[in-house]
Image: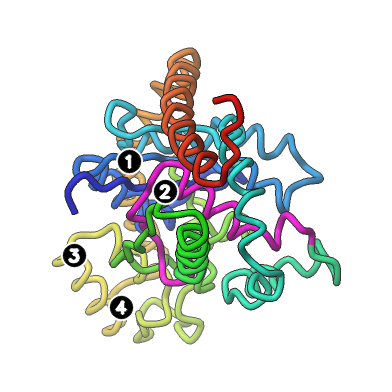
Amino acid sequence: MENKVILTGDRPTGRLHIGHYFGSLINRVKLQNEYETYVEIADVQALTDNFNNPEKVRKNVRQVVLDYLSVGIDPSKATIFIQSLIPEIAELTVFYSNLVTIARLERNPTVKTEIAQKKELFGESVTYGFLGYPVSQAADITAFGASLIPVGEDQLPLIEQCREIVRKFNNIYGDVLIEPEAFLSSSKRVKGLDGNDKMGKSLGNAIYLSDSEEEITKKVMSAVTDPNRITKDTKGNPEVCMVAYYHNLFTGKDEYEKVLEECRNGERGCVACKKELSSNIIEFLRPMREKRRYYEERPEEVDRILIEGTEKARIKAKETMQKVKKAMKLDYYL
């Protein structure tokens, strides 16, 4: 795995939450010490289902960068860049679009799921840009020679589609592109405060990394608990309680076991339990909020990080494009 290049990133459609932290961010911080790491703010891909609200995407670019910096992604170790400022990605997307059929894109399980989720937005007419999301992602990955892509299981079909595109390109034009491998995260998806299997920006069930102490407390106090527990003395079932679920993430092992035991024995009230959890989450996130505040007060430093990271990423993408154009006999006058 020596000298491997990693590509990861997020669509700037909102601030990042604790689901992002446990699901991917914590691993990115670790991996940046071991691999050449590129972190993409995928604003072009965010526009595939936010085309009618570009201001939302633009505003959240900075929010996502602040979240990255707050959790410990280090710009001296990882290259943070903005997708739309790398024109080579768009160029590769056009070239790769000739190597995949519409039928194949429509069969992609991840795309099918996301189209079903966006039914209200698209109706029966899915846009070319949204359907072609895997092609754009293949361009992201190959532009930087990424060979290792940290993903969750739900994203595996997108990586496989990229591998197919790379194989077809290399078969036609020669051995130019690196075929990436998925780096499957061992982290599980964090459930929402409402018990939903997914914590999501659009679901209103998330605790954000940047939430204030008041916001965290208010959200935790509204978390779903055992519906059959009427009084403090009623024996509870922590298996169906989201407060117990989050204690497992933010409370020490011994204290967590105590929470479970007291709940089952009817020795712990839900209000007190929620207050304890709120305090634990607040303390856990405090260093991140303080680091975020540091960068919020220094916008010129954030701009510098983005500009330098994007310039570095552009150099890498240009190198890839030169090889691609030469292989495709498109290197006119170069």
* Mark before the other along the chain sequence, 4 or 2: 2
Quadrant in the rendering for residue 153:
bottom left
User: Label for residue 109?
Assistant: none
Mark pair 4, 2: CA separation: 40 Å
Residue that badge 4 annotates? 263
Q: Residue at point 35% right, 29% down? A: 290
Q: Residue at point 36% right, 63% down? A: 182
Residue that badge 1 annotates? 37
Magenta-drawn stretch contains 150:
yes
Q: Say which amino acid is labelled 2.
A: Thr
Residue that badge 3 annotates? 255
Tell me residue 22's x, y (percent): 35, 57
What secondary structure is found at the residue carrying circle 1?
A: strand
Disc 3, disc 2: CB below 8 Å? no
Q: Nearer the viewer, mark 3 or mark 4?
A: 3
Compared across the picture, whether 110 is left or right of 166 comes to: right
Residue that badge 2 annotates? 8
Position of 278 relative to 164 (above/below): above
Question: Bounds of the magenta span?
Answer: 127-155
Tell me residue 220's x, y (percent): 46, 58
* Mark before the other along the chain sequence, 3 or 4: 3
